[in-house]
Amino acid sequence: MTKLTFPPGFRWGVATSAYQIEGAWNEDGRGESIWDRFVHMPGNVQDGSTGDVACDHYHRWREDVALMQQLAIQVYRFSVSWPRILPAGFGQINQAGLDFYDRLVDGLLAAGITPFITLYHWELPVTLQDKGGWPHRDTASAFAELADVTSRALGDRVKNWITHNEPWCTSMLSHELGEHAPGWRNGNAALKTAHHVLLSHGMAVQRLRANVPDVQVGIALNFEPAVPASASPADYHAARIWDGYYSRWFLDPLYGRHYPADMVAHYRATGYLPHDLDFVRHGDLDLIATPTDFLGINYYTRHLARAADVPDNLPQEIFPDPPAARTEMDWEVYPPALYHLLNWLHFGYRVPKIYITENGCSYLDAPDAGGRVSDERRIRYMRDHLAAAHRAIGNGVPLAGYLQWSLMDNFEWARGYTQRFGIVYVDYETQQRIPKDSAYWYRDVIAGNGFVIAD
C-alpha cells in the first residue's frame, strides 16, 4: 500500500451551481432566466421536472454550510444567479438577491470555508435573451456589469472568482445542439455565442481586478479529450477536429493564440462561418487574452474519435471500457485521460495554476433500511481520478486543488432528477440530506491531505 500525499496547501472542496440547487425561482425579486423558461416548456427535460424548488438551498443554506463544515470541506465553489442580482440583466439591482449571497459568504467564512464564486453557470436573464442573447454583442457588456456589481458587493471577502462555467456548453450544447437553454440549433449563432462569452470573460477579469484586492481569477472549461480509435489518418483527423471543437476553440484565444486556423477552415466548410469571423472586432482578441491566475478544468470522461463514412478506414483498435465501467450518464470511466489532460495543459499552454473545478459521477445508490448510502463506485471513481491527478503533479503540473462535483444530488439540467452526482443524498420530497459513504471517505482524504492506494 502507498500513501499518496498532496502538496502542502492543496485545496479540497465541492462545487454546485445556483439553478441546480437554489430553488426559490420567483422569490424576493428574482427575475426569470432562460432555464426557467426552458424547463417550463414541455419536452425539454427528460422527466418533465423543473428547478423551481430543486434542493431548496435558498432557504436551507445554513444547513448546507453546517454539513460542509462537518465534512471538513475547505473550499465551496458556487455560482450566483444573474437574474437574482440583476432581474433585467442590467440596470436595477435586486438588493434582496445580493443580500442572500452576502449572508452565504459570511456563513461560509464563519465556518472556515473559502468561497469560490462562479459568475455565470448558464442563467441568462430572459430579458437579455429576448434582446438577442449571447449571439448579440451587448450581452457581453451586460455580463461585465454583473461582474462589477457582484464583486463590489462581495469582493472585500471573496478573493477567488471564476467568470464562466463551460463556455462550450453555453455555445455549442445550447445554441448548436439545442440540448440546453435556449435550445437553439444554429452553428453560426453558437460561434458568435462562444466569442461573446470569451469577450465578456475578458471584460469581467478587468472589472474583478479593479474591484477586488488580491483577486485570483480564472475561467472553468470542460474537457472531453479525444483518442483516435485506430492509427488511421482519418481517425487522427477526427480526434483533432473534436479537440478543436471542444477545447482549442476556447483555449487558444484565452492564451493569446487567436482562433485555431484548422477550425476556422472546418467551420467555413460546414457553413458555420458564412461570413468568416465577421463578429470579431479589433481589440477583441487582446481583451479575451487578458491574463488570468488559474484555469479551472471540468473533467468527467474521454471521447473515442472514429471517422464516419470512410470505407477504407483501418480496423478499430481502441475501444471503450466495458459497460460495467460506465456511469448512469452512460459516460465511460477513464481516469488516465485526466492525467494526459493535465499534462497537455501544463506543457502545451503553460497555465500558471490549475484547479480541477468539477470531477464526479452519477450513480443512483439510495439509502438502505438503516439509512446508509453505500456508493463504492463513486469512491472508486474519486480515488482513481485523484491518483491520476497526483501522478500529474509529480510531472510538475501546477495543480492547486480539487473540487468534487457535487456537494449534493440536484437538478441535472435536461436530465432533470434522473441523475445523482452528489456525495450527499437528497430526498427531494422531504429535502433531507444524507451524507453517502463517499462523503465520509472524502472527509478522511481531506483530513490526511491524501489517501492510501494499493500498489
Image (cartoon, rainbow, N blue to C red):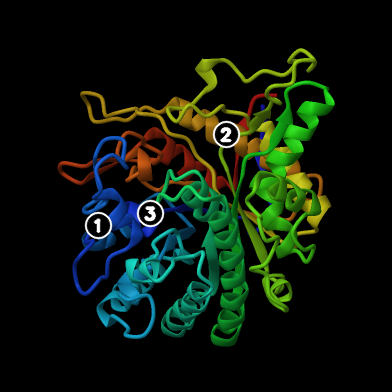
How far apart in space, not on screen, are marks 3 and 2 (Cα)?
Answer: 20 Å
| Depicted 18 relative to depicted 373: above or below | below
Q: Do callouts 1 and 3 mark residues in contact (Cβ within 8 Å)?
A: no
Of the two numbered discs 1 and 2 on the same chain, state the one appearing first in sequence.
1
Tell me the CA gap for discs 1 and 2: 32 Å
In what quadrant of the picture does the C terminus appear? top right
Mark toward the start of the polypeptide (1 vs 3): 1
- Kind of residue sitting beneath label 1: Gly
Neighbour tally class for label 3: few under 14, some 14-19, many 20 plus, Cα within 10 Å: many
Residue 451 in view? yes
- To which residue does mark 3 refer? 68
**Vertical order, 323 against 106 (above or below):** above
Q: Residue furthest left?
A: 430
Residue 368 as seen in the image, left or right of residue 215: left
Q: Position of residue 106 (x, y in %)?
A: 36, 74
Q: Tell me if label 1 and label 2 are in contact, CB under 8 Å.
A: no
| Relative side of 451 to 361, left or right | right
Res. 167 in view: no
Depth check: 149 or 31 in front?
31
Spatial CA distance of label 1 from label 3 is 19 Å
Q: Quick one: quadrant of the N terminus?
A: top right
Judged left or right of residue 196, residue 277 is right
Apparent side of residue 152 relative to residue 102 in the rendered image (left or right): right
Task: Point out the tag, 3 or 2, that comes first from the N-terminus.
Answer: 3
Residue 287 is situated, as x and y percent measured from the top left of the image, at 68, 76
**What residue did someone put label 1 on?**
23
Looking at the rendered structure, the secondary structure element under dot 3 is helix
Rendered residue at 74%/43% (across/down): 392
Question: What type is the residue that disc 3 sits on?
Answer: Met
Per the rendering, the mark at residue 351 is none
For mark 2, what is the residue? 383
Q: 10 Å neighbourhood of mark 2: few (<14), some, or many (≥20)?
A: many
